[in-house]
């Protein structure tokens, strides 16, 4: 089936939008840590015009559900919900950590990826993923926020080679180098909307969508909850 999926990501320093139409991907991406709100909607408009589509013609709207910057994730959810409400589109939340795994495969052919985003406060958002035969990914380690020193204590050695993805590897390079697993570096630092769109296909095929009002973030830190989002107090 030819899916038409719009994907939005502002969860990290990177701001990206992608429009998947069948096997064709239209993308915009820019490092803009303080300008997400200015950049993302013009990017959406550009891609829709480029593809000759309107929002109402799409099958779904995918968004980066986190983890990532609290502000970035809130912006992503808010913009995605606004677009989803307006066009009555089903919504699909995709993990930023898993999106980076897909990015490592797209760029380097990696099928085992260890994703680590700098979570500040001497912690990383962590997840490991292994590619399935159908191109989707399964979790090897549960997504979590954890100090790198504690991660070193908990990750067990194995014989596989894991491709690094995310800013956490560089931010805590000394401690992360002590992990008991074999890793190889990559230039995948941030999630990209084109990988979110690709992963959203699997969720759409399985009917894993929610209406716009039920779209929710994943912060991993329990101290931040939905009630802190605008309009959710």
Image (cartoon, rainbow, N blue to C red):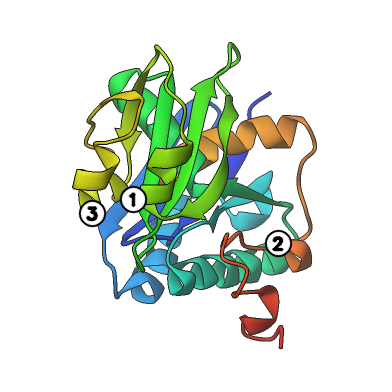
What distance separates the C-alpha of mark 1 from that of mark 3? 26 Å
What distance separates the C-alpha of mark 2 from that of mark 1? 23 Å
Residue holding disc 3? 171
In this picture, is 146 found above or below 80? above
In this picture, is 28 found above or below 2? below
Q: Residues within 10 Å of mark 1 (few under 14, many from 20)?
A: many
Q: Image point 72% across, 55% down: which residue?
A: 89
- Please tell me whether mark 1 sits on a helix, a strand or a loop: strand
Do residues under tags 3 and 2 come within 8 Å of each other at their CB atoms?
no
Do residues under tags 1 and 3 come within 8 Å of each other at their CB atoms?
no
Residue holding disc 2? 215
What distance separates the C-alpha of mark 3 from that of mark 2? 30 Å
State the residue lying farthest toward the front: 153
Please state which of the two labelled residues, at mark 3 or mark 2, is closer to the viewer: 3
| Quadrant containing the C terminus in the rendered view | bottom right
Do residues under tags 2 and 1 come within 8 Å of each other at their CB atoms?
no
Residue holding disc 1? 28
Tell which circle, 2 or 1, labels the residue nearer the N-terminal end: 1
Residue 73, percent across and down?
50, 66
Tell which circle, 1 or 3, labels the residue nearer the N-terminal end: 1
Residue 185, percent across and down?
22, 30
In this picture, is 214 found above or below 34? above
Q: Which mark is residue 127?
A: none
Residue 75, percent across and down?
50, 72
In this picture, is 115 found above or below 182? below
- Please tell me whether mark 3 sits on a helix, a strand or a loop: helix
Q: Residues within 10 Å of mark 2 (few under 14, many from 20)?
A: many
Q: Image point 41% across, 55% down: which residue?
A: 147
| Quadrant containing the N terminus in the rendered view | top right
């Amino acid at each position: 089936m030819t899916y038409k999926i719009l994907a939005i990501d502002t969860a990290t320093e990177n701001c990206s939008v992608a429009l998947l139409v069948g096997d064709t991907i239209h993308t915009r991406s820019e490092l803009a840590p303080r300008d997400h709100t200015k950049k993302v909607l013009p990017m959406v408009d550009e891609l829709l015009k480029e593809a000759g589509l309107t929002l109402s013609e799409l099958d779904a709207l995918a968004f980066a559900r986190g983890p990532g910057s609290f502000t970035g994730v809130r912006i992503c959810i808010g913009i995605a919900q606004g677009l989803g409400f307006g066009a009555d589109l089903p919504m699909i939340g995709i993990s930023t950590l898993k999106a980076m795994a897909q990015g490592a495969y797209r760029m380097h052919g990696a099928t085992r990826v260890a994703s680590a985003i700098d979570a500040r406060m001497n912690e990383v958002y962590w997840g490991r993923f292994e590619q399935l035969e159908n191109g989707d990914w399964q979790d090897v380690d549960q997504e979590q926020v954890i100090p790198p020193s504690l991660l070193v204590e908990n990750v067990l050695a194995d014989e596989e080679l894991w491709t690094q993805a995310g800013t956490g590897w560089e931010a805590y390079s000394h401690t992360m180098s002590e992990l008991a697993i074999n890793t190889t570096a990559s230039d995948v630092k941030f999630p990209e909307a084109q990988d979110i769109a690709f992963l959203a296909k699997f969720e759409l095929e399985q009917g894993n969508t929610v209406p716009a009002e039920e779209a929710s973030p994943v912060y991993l830190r329990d101290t931040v909850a939905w009630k802190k989002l605008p309009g959710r107090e």
